[in-house]
């Protein structure tokens, strides 16, 4: 009986210890624009994250724990984004995937820094968040890299020697960085800026006025630094007045919605991209097929970057040491595999990514050159 009672006590003790184990899920927050004019980025980024989470859960999760998502719509509004980020912090998320625009990232960076929670910007490139030792890291380089590269390409390869630019003040942390960096390089090469006009997304009158002012000054190319919806509207205004006017956009507009809404008015436009949609690489094709099958839409660059970013964050949660922060592990490891090439972080958490110049031909993005 003594032996029996001892075995029974050990069994009960074991059950009690098992009940005290941490069986809670790994929780990731998502922050992005899921309403308004930025939905093509926010929606595909959320879907890319969801696809990655579903794949990890199908393989048993992280340390036997399932991965859950808490989704927040920032509505492309800084105050809404701050409230949403604070809610994610209070929920105790392990990390936040997003946001997808620079203005939102700038508005919430202090919150995650104070909380010590990693935030992975999906498509954020503002120079304001460069070279800072903080909790914000991102899947792309600053605009200084991409705008400089595009300026060199247009001037040297396409023989564009004058340009006018129209840019959106609604995401000025990105657009002002891009325009300033592009202008500096283009002028240093000997090019001329004929006009630089602004508008605020959602304000149709200011958008139309900007297009009219730009059209009053002849130039080799009109550059649109705006989301896909506004870029499509601007292209229509410009091309209706000057059908043969050469057009290009910054990377921000490079989604399927630009073609869908712009139609014939965006034919021939040059768009710098973060992915090669024509790639025959098996990993990319498998990813694309899975994404389309799951969500009935193309992933675009936001979907692919969010997918890659979610996988690297979850891999890091699984592999980091108990006394190591998530940020420190990621930056110490620095290189992670991904669809269409590895993600490489510098010591501040800015990643590098390939870029491709595409031209819209017959309703498709055709790669012209890798930069």
Image (cartoon, grey):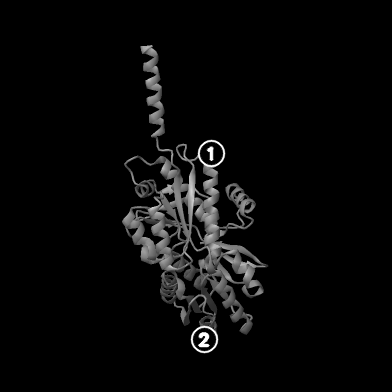
Residue 292 in sight: yes
Residue in the picture at 40% in, 38% down: 22
Query: How dense is the environment of label 1, judged by Cα within 10 Å: few (below 14), some, or many (20 and up)?
Result: few
Q: Which mark is residue 261?
A: none
Q: What residue does disc 1 label?
A: 59
Percent across and percent down for residue 291 are: 60, 52
Left or right placement of residue 3 versus residue 163 in this view: left
**Which one is in front in this view, the residue at disc 2 or the one at disc 1?**
1
Q: Which residue is most to the right?
A: 362
Asked where in the image residue 37 lies, by quadrant, the reply is: bottom right
First in sequence, mark 2 or 1: give its number: 1
Q: Secondary structure at mark 2?
A: helix
Percent across and percent down for residue 270 are: 57, 70
Query: How dense is the environment of label 2, judged by Cα within 10 Å: few (below 14), some, or many (20 and up)?
Result: some
Q: Which residue is most to the front?
A: 1
Residue in the picture at 53% in, 70% down: 227
Asked where in the image residue 300 lies, by quadrant, the reply is: bottom right
Residue in the picture at 34% in, 48% down: 328
Percent across and percent down for residue 97 are: 45, 55
Report the front residue among 258 and 143: 258
Q: Which residue is most to the bottom?
A: 216
Report the front residue among 27 and 105: 27
Above or below 53: residue 230: below
Q: Are marks 2 and 1 in contact (CB under 8 Å)?
A: no
Q: Quadrant of the N terminus?
A: top left
Left or right placement of residue 244 versus residue 197 in this view: right
Cα distance in 3D space between marks 2 and 1: 56 Å
Q: Secondary structure at mark 1?
A: loop
Residue 267 in sight: no
Percent across and percent down for residue 74 are: 46, 63
Q: What residue does disc 2 label?
A: 213
């Amino acid at each position: 009986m003594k032996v029996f009672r001892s075995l029974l006590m050990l069994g009960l003790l074991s059950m009690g210890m098992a009940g005290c184990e941490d069986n809670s899920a790994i929780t990731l927050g998502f922050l992005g624009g899921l309403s308004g004019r930025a939905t093509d980025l926010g929606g595909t980024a959320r879907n890319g994250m969801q696809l990655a989470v579903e794949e990890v859960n199908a393989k048993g999760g992280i340390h036997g724990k399932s991965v859950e998502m808490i989704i927040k719509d920032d509505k492309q509004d800084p105050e809404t984004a701050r409230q949403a980020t604070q809610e994610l912090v209070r929920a105790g998320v392990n990390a936040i995937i997003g946001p997808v625009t620079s203005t939102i990232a700038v508005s919430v960076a202090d919150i995650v820094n104070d909380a010590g929670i990693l935030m992975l910007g999906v498509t954020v490139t503002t120079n304001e968040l460069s070279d800072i030792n903080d909790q914000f890291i991102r899947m792309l380089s600053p605009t200084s890299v991409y705008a400089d590269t595009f300026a060199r390409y247009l001037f040297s390869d396409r023989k564009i020697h004058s340009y006018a630019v129209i840019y959106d003040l609604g995401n000025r942390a990105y657009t002002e960085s891009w325009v300033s960096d592009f202008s500096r390089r283009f002028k240093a090469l000997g090019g001329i800026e004929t006009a630089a006009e602004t508008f605020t997304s959602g304000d149709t009158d200011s958008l139309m006025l900007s297009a009219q002012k730009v059209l009053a000054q002849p130039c080799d190319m009109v550059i649109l630094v705006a989301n896909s919806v506004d870029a499509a509207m601007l292209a229509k205004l410009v091309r209706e007045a000057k059908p043969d006017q050469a057009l290009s956009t910054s990377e921000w507009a490079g989604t399927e919605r630009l073609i869908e809404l712009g139609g014939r008015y965006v034919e021939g436009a040059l768009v710098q991209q973060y992915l090669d949609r024509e790639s025959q690489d098996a990993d990319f094709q498998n990813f694309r097929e899975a994404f389309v099958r799951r969500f009935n839409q193309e992933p675009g660059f936001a979907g692919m970057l969010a997918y890659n970013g979610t996988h690297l964050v979850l891999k890091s949660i699984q592999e980091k040491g108990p006394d190591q922060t998530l940020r420190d592990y990621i930056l110490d490891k620095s290189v992670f595999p991904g669809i269409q090439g590895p993600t490489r972080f510098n010591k501040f958490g800015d990643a590098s990514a390939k870029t491709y110049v595409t031209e819209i031909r017959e309703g498709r993005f055709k790669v012209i050159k890798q930069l």
